[in-house]
């Protein structure tokens, strides 16, 4: 077992299990995904710490617990088609790719996605399809999606994403009017009804786009 594998095992034991991350498939995907490859080399020693890290362009990789929690909330069974808004460094995408049939992921920052695509290729993550676009518009050509995950916080749940969520389906995203007042939120669509459930307080970068925040 490599040092990184040992650190990942310790991360699961110390950070995830005590906080209620118990889905065996989610834990396995996290255990098998080399988080350090998704951040710059100078930060490799901190890759498995209980905190977010910068990935450039004003973006971050979420702390492992938040990635695990959002993934677990999607209740994936393995057959799903997932939409991810905010590809970032690709770590969340890679976790999802091990748990579903296909991941469609949208990023707005071109150089960030170019780097991330190289990591996907290196790890043979061939069930991830990505593009540069306004993620708040979703990806209507491939809708509906069994699950949607948004890795940036907007002032409200974007309507296009609700429209593109399958029935039944689950969306998980942070929502908040300010950086200090964000709530991780579960949106469940079933039998034509949409229910919105707050989960816990979080802090994410802003969701920029037509149905999010205006670019500065």
Image: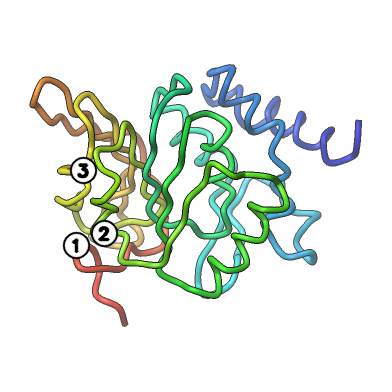
Between the C-alphas of marks 3 and 2, the distance is: 11 Å
Tell which of 5 and 15 is nearer to you: 5
Q: Are marks 1 and 2 in contact (CB under 8 Å)?
A: yes
Q: Residues within 10 Å of mark 2 (few under 14, many from 20)?
A: many
Q: Secondary structure at mark 1?
A: loop
Q: Quadrant of the C terminus?
A: bottom left
Determine which of the numbered discs, if any, sits on residue 164 in the image: 3
Q: Quadrant of the rendered structure where residue 37 is?
A: bottom right
Q: Secondary structure at mark 2?
A: helix
- Which residue corresponds to the image point at 48% horizontal and 56% vertical from the top-left? 87
* Image location (x, y in percent) of residue 179: 35, 62
Badge 3 element: helix
Instruction: Give the CA distance from mark 1 to mark 2.
Output: 5 Å
Give the foreground label among 1 and 3: 3
- The residue identified by callout 2 is 136
| Depth order, front residue of 146/207 | 146
Q: Would you place residue 76 above or below residue 132 in this image?
A: above
Residue displayed at 75% across by 35% down: 8
Q: Is residue 26 left or right of residue 188?
A: right
* Mark linked to residue 211: 1
Question: Where residue 151 sits: x, y (%)?
Answer: 41, 52
204 left or right of 123?
left
| Extreme-bottom residue of the structure | 216
Q: Position of residue 191 (x, y in %)?
A: 11, 20
């Amino acid at each position: 077992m490599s040092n990184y594998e040992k650190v990942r095992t310790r991360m699961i034991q110390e950070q995830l299990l005590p906080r209620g991350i118990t889905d065996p498939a989610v834990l396995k995907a996290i255990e098998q995904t080399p988080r350090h490859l998704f951040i710059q080399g100078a930060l490799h020693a901190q890759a498995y710490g209980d905190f977010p890290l910068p990935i450039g362009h004003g973006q971050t990789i979420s702390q492992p617990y938040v990635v695990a929690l959002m993934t677990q909330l999607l209740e994936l069974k393995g057959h799903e088609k997932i939409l991810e808004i905010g590809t970032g460094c690709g770590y969340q995408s890679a976790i999802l790719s091990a748990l579903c049939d296909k991941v469609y992921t949208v990023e707005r920052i071109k150089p960030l996605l170019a780097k991330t695509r190289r990591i996907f290729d290196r790890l043979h993550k061939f069930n991830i399809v990505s593009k540069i676009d306004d993620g708040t518009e979703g990806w209507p050509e491939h809708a509906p999606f069994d699950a949607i995950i948004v890795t940036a916080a907007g002032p409200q749940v974007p309507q296009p994403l609700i429209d593109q969520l399958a029935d039944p389906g689950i969306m998980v995203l942070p929502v908040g009017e300010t950086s200090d007042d964000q709530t991780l939120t579960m949106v469940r669509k079933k039998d034509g009804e949409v229910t919105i459930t707050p989960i816990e307080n979080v802090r994410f970068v802003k969701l920029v786009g037509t149905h999010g925040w205006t670019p500065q």
